[in-house]
Structure formats: C-alpha cells, structure tokens
Amino acid sequence: MRKAFVFDFDDTLAETECKVIVRADADDQIVARLSPKQYNTHKLRFDCHYDYSDFRDGSFIKHASPTWLIHLAREVSEEGHNVFILTAREHKVIGEIEEWLSDQNVDITASYCVGGTSSQIAERKKKVLLDIVKEYDKIYFYDDSEENVNIFQHEKL
C-alpha cells in the first residue's frame, strides 16, 4: 500500500515569528498583527487588506521551532513513506523550508508552495491534493486551517 503524508508548514510542522499584517486601505497603516492561528479565523474589515511580507522572508524559517508533528513527519520519512509539504507560502522560500526540514531529519518527496491571495489558497491546495491522491492508496493530510482540512471532507476523500 502506497502511503503519502502531506503537511502544511506554518503552525503544523513549525512555529515562526511570522505575522500576517492587517493594513488600512486608506493610509496603509498597521491595524493588527496576526499569528497564523489568528489569521485562520480572522474576518477582514472591508477597509483593510492583508500584508504577507513576513512569509516571504526566509530568515524567519531558519529560526523556526518544531511542533509536536515534526516527530510524525520524521518517523514516516524514516519508514520510507512519501512526505509532501503543501504550504501557502510563496515559492521563493522553498529552499529555506527544505533546509529546515533536512535539519530536522525529514526527507521530503516534494514541496508545493501555493502562495497568492488568501481567497485562492484553499483552492490551490485542493488541486495539489487531488493530484497526489491519484498516485497513492492512502493519504494523510495535516494542516492547521480547518478550511484546508475540510477540502478532504468536501471531496469525500
């Protein structure tokens, strides 16, 4: 049986000091700084926008702290199962993510960065997951966002 383990990065495998910044449209002033967990349930005011610039900075990744799930990722990697990273970050930081995971003794099969506007993230993750599903008998998906986890339930996977 071919198994694949798909992990989100931020607040799933690693905790960083990255914040999603909420800025006012009128003057670009900072209204709030949100952790990834806070962002998952945040309702954006009509007169504001999100600034994801922290998540484009690879230096935050180098100082990330592993979560308890890193042990599972390491274990299934050592057992020879395929491990995928599926993150909302943009592709420019994939090298830092892969290096950090290597330092954690996690061998990655492939990494997917689906960064973009927040309204597109769930749909982009869904597309990648559906492609992975085609190749494996069993998929385990870990993500700190309930919306992203519900992708599997909505697709009856």
Image: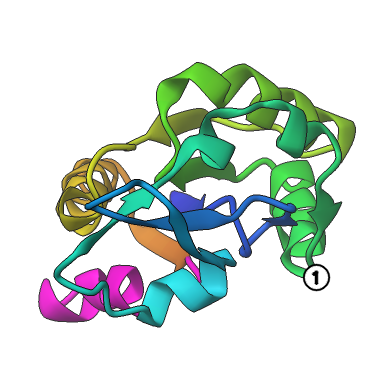
Residue at image point 79% right, 50% down: 74
The answer to whether 55 appears left or right of 117 in the picture is: right
Q: Residue 13 or 80: which is nearer the viewer? A: 13
Quadrant (top left/top right/bottom left/bottom right) for the N terminus: bottom left
Q: Residue 20 or 7: which is nearer the viewer? A: 20
Range shown magenta: 143-157
Q: Residue 14 or 44: which is nearer the viewer? A: 44
The answer to whether 99 appears left or right of 152 in the picture is: right
Q: Residue 13 or 55: which is nearer the viewer? A: 55
Q: Give the mark count.
A: 1
Magenta segment, prevailing SS (helix, strand or loop): helix
Residue at image point 54% right, 39% down: 55
Residue at image point 58% right, 40% down: 54
The 10 Å Cα crowd at callout 1, few under 14, some 14 to 19, many 20 or more, is few
Q: Quadrant of residue 104?
A: top right
In the rendered image, residue 109 lying in the magenta stretch gets the answer: no
In the rendered image, residue 154 lying in the magenta stretch gets the answer: yes
Q: Quadrant of residue 59?
A: top right
Q: Look at mark 1 in the image and give the residue it sits on.
A: 68
Q: Farthest residue toward the front?
A: 27
- In the rendered structure, which amino acid carries the disc numbered 1? Trp
Residue at image point 41% right, 30% down: 90
Q: Is residue 84 visible?
A: yes
